[in-house]
């Protein structure tokens, strides 16, 4: 007998096929969420859901166009048939849960911003058109608010410090930051947990970036830039030619450009004098400006890329990313400040989400995305949402615990927080308009 643990993200869907006797993972796969054709973020998709037959179209996009092919691929990889899968657990944000079940999500984007449901009873996967074993159960991790859903409750269930302590079972203060299309943040300990969500956009997964891509083969995932020559030293995923830039690579590139003074605090390029290359007098400059004075930095020339085009980062890309990082940092501060806490009160910071094999913490701090804390306080925990779905799949106790976590977590709606926009605007700078928050940088 087998089970499926699925994490449905706004941009990416990932799944594990698990042997329920041994609890071992037999196969795993990821895919783009086919709903992306209806918008890069949840608001655009909710608007599309209101159009003629929109509820059915959004549900079909996730069930028939995304999950069904994903399940077929997992079964082929493991050499099993669908009728051997008896259980399915899902960790998804609140809007994705509505789309999955074919429920109108419009109340999420309209005041008072309340979802149609937080918890949903156990039901059959066949009820939404996913054919598995006869009577196969489908279990959704519960939501806690309009923009903090089952992906975060499942993530909190699984989230543990390097010492293996669960964040909901220890007195020390933990900060969980899940970096995805919607940046979700949880702060607290065994006495309380506060959560909020900020619209970071798809930049952390390569979206809204001219040469952006998911963390897959050919993606630039890390970068150093020479201070004098501006020549980049790139690290790629896989052994192929460069194809684009994923989220962790974007953080490195922008942090490096800022460190060497190629861009200013607003993300605008400077004309930087580069020593002449005597061996190649016709060499093209790494930093170029168009006829409107808009700059870009070329990481890979067309002849060296797998796309046949330059791989570069533009001022528009940087601006999009600055807004994404500002959303994360302002969300963190909006959780801490009303409670009388500062970043110095945080004992551990756990980074989760789908941005490749992990981010360079120093660079994330350098650009003002994460608090300026000792690096030893940071750890990367991967896809905690999927880890939580997996634990729910193999353990009835975990399935019960995730509901308990959801019922005892306080949701903060940033759209109603009077100071959030001030925090956001202040963070739309490298690293921040308040330099005292980043003394080591």
Image (cartoon, rainbow, N blue to C red):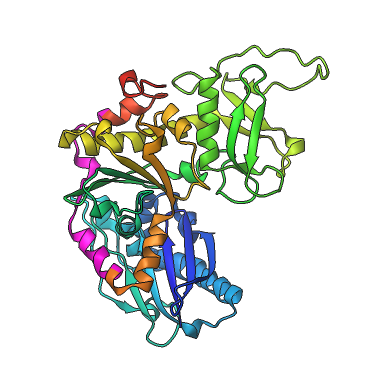
Give the overall secondary structure of the magenta segment: helix
Query: Is residue 93 depicted above or below 24 in this figure?
Result: above
Q: Position of residue 221 (x, y in %)?
A: 57, 41
Residue furthest to the bottom in view is 134
Q: Residue at position x 30%, y 63% from top?
A: 104
Q: Residue at position x 39%, y 81% from top?
A: 126
Q: Nearer the viewer, residue 31 or 356?
A: 356
Does residue 339 appear in this view?
A: yes
Q: Is residue 392 left or right of residue 69?
A: left
Question: Residue 198 appears in which quarter of the rendering?
Answer: top left
Q: Residue at position x 45%, y 49% from top?
A: 40
Q: Over which residues does the magenta segment extend?
A: 398-422
Question: Residue 150 appears in which quarter of the rendering?
Answer: bottom left
Q: Position of residue 31 (x, y in %)?
A: 53, 60
Q: Is residue 306 left or right of residue 440?
A: right
Q: Position of residue 238 (x, y in %)?
A: 66, 50
Query: Is residue 81 depicted above or below 408 in this figure?
Result: below
Say if the magenta span includes residue 401.
yes
Tell me the quarter of the image containing the C terminus: top left
Query: Is residue 387 depicted above or below 397 in this figure?
Result: above
Question: Residue 403 appears in which quarter of the rendering?
Answer: bottom left
Q: Nearer the viewer, residue 212 or 431?
A: 431
Say if the magenta span includes residue 177.
no
Q: Nearer the viewer, residue 184 or 402?
A: 402
Q: Is residue 101 left or right of residue 290?
A: left
């Amino acid at each position: 007998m087998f089970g499926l643990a699925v994490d449905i993200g706004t941009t990416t869907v990932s799944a594990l096929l698990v042997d329920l006797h041994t609890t071992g993972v037999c196969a795993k796969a990821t895919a783009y969420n086919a709903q992306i054709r209806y918008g890069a973020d949840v608001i655009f998709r909710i608007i599309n859901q209101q159009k003629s037959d929109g509820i059915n179209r959004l549900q079909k996009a996730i069930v028939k166009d995304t999950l069904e092919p994903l399940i077929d691929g997992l079964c082929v990889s493991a050499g099993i048939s669908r009728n051997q899968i008896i259980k399915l657990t899902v960790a998804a944000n609140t809007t994705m849960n509505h789309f999955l079940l074919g429920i109108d999500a419009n109340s999420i984007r309209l005041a008072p911003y309340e979802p149609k449901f937080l918890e949903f009873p156990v039901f059959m996967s066949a009820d939404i058109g996913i054919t598995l074993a006869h009577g196969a159960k489908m279990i959704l991790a519960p939501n806690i608010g309009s923009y903090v859903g089952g992906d975060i409750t499942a993530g909190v269930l699984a989230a543990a410090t390097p010492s293996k302590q669960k964040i909901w079972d220890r007195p020390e203060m933990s900060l969980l930051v899940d970096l995805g299309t919607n940046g979700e943040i949880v702060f607290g300990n065994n006495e309380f947990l506060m959560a909020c969500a900020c619209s970071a956009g798809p930049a952390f997964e390569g979206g809204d970036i001219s040469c952006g891509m998911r963390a897959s083969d050919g993606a630039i995932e890390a970068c150093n830039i020479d201070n004098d020559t501006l020549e980049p030293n790139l690290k790629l995923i896989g052994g192929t030619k460069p194809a684009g830039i994923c989220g962790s690579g974007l953080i490195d590139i922008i942090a490096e450009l800022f460190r060497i003074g190629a861009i200013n605090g607003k993300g605008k390029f400077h004309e930087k004098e580069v020593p002449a290359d005597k061996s190649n007098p016709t060499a093209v400059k790494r930093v170029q400006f168009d006829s409107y004075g808009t700059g870009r930095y070329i990481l890979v020339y067309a002849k060296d890329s797998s796309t046949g085009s330059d791989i570069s980062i533009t001022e528009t890309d940087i601006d999009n990313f600055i807004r994404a990082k500002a959303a994360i940092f302002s969300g963190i501060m909006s959780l801490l400040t009303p409670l009388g806490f500062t970043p110095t009160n945080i004992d551990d910071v756990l980074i989760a989400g789908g941005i490749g094999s992990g981010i360079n913490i120093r660079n994330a701090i350098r650009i003002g995305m994460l608090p300026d804390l000792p690096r030893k306080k940071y750890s990367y925990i991967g896809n905690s949402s999927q880890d939580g779905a997996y634990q729910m799949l193999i353990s009835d106790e975990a399935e019960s615990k995730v509901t308990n976590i959801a019922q005892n977590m306080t949701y903060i709606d940033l759209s109603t927080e009077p100071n959030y926009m001030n925090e956001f605007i202040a963070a739309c700078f490298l690293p921040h308009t308040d330099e005292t928050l980043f003394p080591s940088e």
